[in-house]
Image (cartoon, helix red, strand yellow):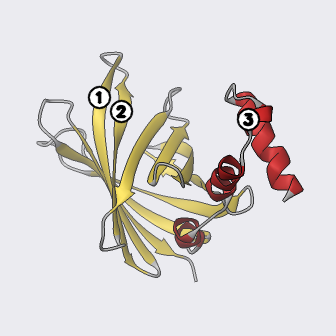
Amino acid sequence: MKKIYALALLAMAFAGGKASAQSDAEMKAWETYMTPGAAHKMMATETGTWYCDMTFWQNPDTKPEKASTTAEIKMIMGGRYQQSAYTGNVMGMPFEGHGVVAFDNATKEYISTWIDNMGTGMMVMKGKMNPDGKTMVLTGEMVDPVEGKPVKCREVYTIVDNDTRKMEMYDLRSGKEFKTMEIIMKRKK
């Protein structure tokens, strides 16, 4: 409990709170906030190597492009976050991408960040798991480098079975939502 109390005090200091006002209820809230739960256990089931079959659409009227990558997924920071590292060849170029997924115990939502070597920005998305426990819908923004402006986007992440995942990305670049990417992930056995 002393370790949790020390961490809570540190968090309060960063948040501008006063350590002397720390109550038992606040301590319990911090303990709950920092303890991995069922959502984190679900994310941990994806630990391992995944082969990713990727399909991209530049706009609704173009022929899709294909690529493949490999993803190494693991839990970090005591099972609190899921980290993924993707490598492969995309659009004729070496590709590297990194993601971190969190489940925020306080807001009860998933938060996803993404960076890759095909840009210099960061995509941040937030969302919730559907009641079926199989489909997560996240929304956020990414930057359109041509316009230099943010574009709203939506991701649908589906747990197909223990060894298969499907990720679909949509954007509103033209004012209408259209599918820009689909990734079918298969666990390496």
Give the SS element for disc 3. helix
Q: CA distance from mark 1 to mark 2?
A: 5 Å
Measuring from the top left, give residue 172's x and y in whole percent.
20, 35
Q: Amino acid at mark 2?
A: Glu
Measuring from the top left, give residue 78's x and y in whole percent.
74, 61
Q: CA distance from mark 3 to mark 2?
A: 38 Å
Tell me if mark 1 has few (under 14), some (14-19) or many (20+) residues whose alpha carbon lies within 10 angstroms of its own: some
Residue 182 visible somewhere in the drawing: no
Q: Amino acid at mark 1?
A: Val
Give the SS element for disc 2. strand
Look at the numbered discs 1 and 2 and tell me whether their residues touch, using CB distance below 8 Å: yes
> What is the quadrant of residue 154 in the picture?
top left
Q: Which mark is residue 141?
A: 2
Q: Which mark is residue 21?
A: 3
Question: Which numbered mark, 1 or 3, is in the foreground of this view?
Answer: 3
Which residue appears at 47% of the width and 80% of the height?
163
Q: CA distance from mark 1 to mark 3?
A: 43 Å
**189 shown above or below 32:** below
Residue highlighted by disc 1: 151
Q: Does residue 39 appear to the left or right of 56 in the view shown?
A: right
